Amino acid sequence: MGSTLGQGHPEYFSAVNANPAETSFRVGAPSEPLYFPSGNHQLFAWLHWPTDARLLDMGLVICKPFGYEATCAHRSMRVFAETAAALGIPVLRFDYLGTGDSGDGDPASEQIGTWLQDVAGAVSELRRRTGVKRVCLLGLRLGALLATAAAQRAPLADAMILMAPVLDGRRYVRELRTMALAGAGAANASVSDKQAARAGSLEVSGYVLSAATIATLSQTTVSSAAAAPARDILIIDRDDLPAASAWSETLRQLGARTHYVVLPGFVKMMMTPPQYALVPTAMREVVRDWLLQFAGSAAGVAAERHPGDAPPSAAAAALTLADANGMPSMALRERPVSVVRERMLFGIVTEPPTEERRGRAVILLNSGADYHIGAGRMYVSMARRWAMRGYVVLRMDLAGLGDSATRPGRPDDEVFPPSVIDDVREAIDFMRSEYAVREVTLGGLCSAAYHTLRAAVAGLPLNRLLMVNPQNFSWKEGMANDDLQLVDVIKERGYGNRALSLANWKRLLTGRIDVRTVFRIHSVRARLAIESALRDAARWLHIKLPRDLGSELQEIAARGVRVVFVFARGEPGIDLLKIQGGSAVKRLGDHCHVHIIDSADHTFTWSGPRARLEQVLSDELFASCLSSVNSNPQNC
């Protein structure tokens, strides 16, 4: 068991090669990753135990929102769980089927009914593991609708906390369709990509709802129910678009003790990219105070318990993923792991079938401050696909991101922390020691691509780099995410062409154009042009310059490392690579491949471009394997 960090950071047991029966967590261990059964499938969850031996006779189940909102609110949900645990309330936060780290479902199936079953399964698991008699459901957005609908089906909850609740499924579907159309326009997605999903399905921000799900969701409403879903209900409405006041009054008339408040923080929590998202302090305090009041009316304090005292169940320390033909011998396994117990670097390892292991590993790093599932859950799909080809894949949270602990003195959700190289080195050592891998590939999207490059420059033992849409190749300590970057200069290369337009003169004269920013952009662009030419000349003369991308790539390739860049067409990183890498990129020959994918946005939101990205990365990953198959068939 690793040592506990302060401020509610997680502590967990390294589950690799562990016997589930020997994996014991006690009350007082802040959090425990686990899998539990729901129907005929397994779900991933975090169980947050109270931070001391005082365990109140009530528990909390957190029902997360859908899609990108869940990614943005990941930090907030973890803070809500830790806040409740600090009060003596055990908390289970879980992933529905087909989301997060849970198993995959049939993409064409009806998901709402399954997710309602998952809510009930989470309540049962919390009761089984902790022995609590009373349960409160905390739902955010769609999670609030699911929690309410599940509680209306069966008496699951004694109390509920509903944050910015979705009350009417049809209205929510219209909202999602509007977001999808806006995203398609911004991404310039082609018609064929928009039609790639099954007819009637809805794809928004990288997540898909099937046609059957849309049909059920459109008929789901909680505001017209004839009975209240629980006796005690706290409703926290969003201050920008409050919509639950009338429903709160209806619940009161149905006999529920309701408390309705309108608070700020929704947009910053759930509609802001994770690296900029903020935990809503006002909401957290109201939730804490309300839970204290509700818990104070509990009948008593539960006896101290740990999983060894709980009745047997199908819960496991690993998730088994059967192959397409359902053959157990070809099943994949996923395990939550602590890469470094002392610093609590968290990850999920996808293990190939034993007879398929090839001594190769892939490590995927956070894109921005997204947690380890990746943008649109793409890392989960890639990991499971590559594991079927014999690769062990680690989806890892760097320190301060996702479910990893934050280093003392550093902020949460820091995208470019100075300690990344140490984290990556620990991950490589972990994969080599635990799985005896000979080859390691490192990669990821956006900031993960930058960290991948820096790890290779630092000389870490890597065999392949998979870098997707990097937006910078250098970063100085102390820079902020919103500072003017070279990528901003590249993005605005059209300023000169538009400078003489009447519309832009009007914008300039009315103060709608920041003249200082424009001047800085043109100044930096001029400097870049001169600097690029000088750096090329220095490379020809074998003069080593600091932080010279071209020279760095040449040195990496000289060590036999395969370098792969993949860009969405129009990404500023393409021009940045040309400017900073110069002619050195072409001279790398087959050691460096650059791919450009059409009709994609920065995070490959649409399924068509995302599938092409996965195929390109897979082809590159398997390339050296395929080239050596004739000499040694066991290598591939």
Image (tube, rainbow, N blue to C red):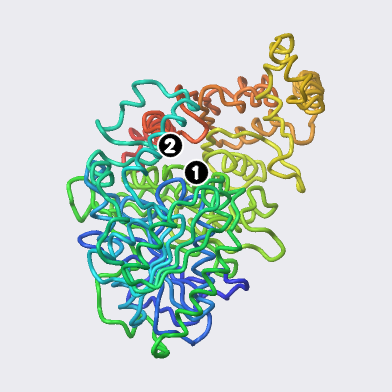
Q: Nearer the viewer, residue 67 or 373?
A: 67
Q: Going 46% across and 72% down the picture, which residue do you hit?
A: 48
Q: Are marks 1 and 2 in contact (CB under 8 Å)?
A: yes
Identify residue type, mark 1. Thr
Q: How many neighbours does mark 2 have within 10 angstroms: few (below 14), some (14-19), or many (20 or more)?
A: many
What separation in Å lies between label 1 and label 2 (alpha carbons)?
8 Å
Q: Going 70% across and 9% down the picture, which residue do you hit?
A: 501
Q: Going 54% across and 57% down the picture, which residue do you hit?
A: 429
Asked if 135 appears above or below 363 in the picture, the reply is: below
Q: How many neighbours does mark 1 have within 10 angstroms: few (below 14), some (14-19), or many (20 or more)?
A: many
Q: Is residue 293 left or right of residue 493?
A: left
> Which element carries disc 1, helix, strand or loop?
strand
Name the quadrant containing residue 481: top right
Residue 249: assigned label: none
Q: Nearer the viewer, residue 495 or 390?
A: 495
Q: Going 35% across and 65% down the picture, which residue do you hit?
A: 251
Measured as percent of width and height from the top left, residue 215 is found at 23, 42
User: Pointer 1: what residue?
Assistant: 441
Asked if 394 appears above or below 200 in the picture, the reply is: below
User: Pointer 2: what residue?
Assistant: 621
Q: Nearer the viewer, residue 612 or 594?
A: 612
Identify residue type, mark 2. Leu
Measured as percent of width and height from the top left, residue 464 is found at 52, 39
N-terminal of the pair, mark 1 or mark 2, is 1
Q: Nearer the viewer, residue 8 or 318?
A: 8
Measured as percent of width and height from the top left, residue 87 is found at 52, 79
> Which element carries disc 2, helix, strand or loop?
helix
- Placement of the C terminus among the 4 image quadrants: top left
Asked if 257 appears above or below 180 in the picture, the reply is: below
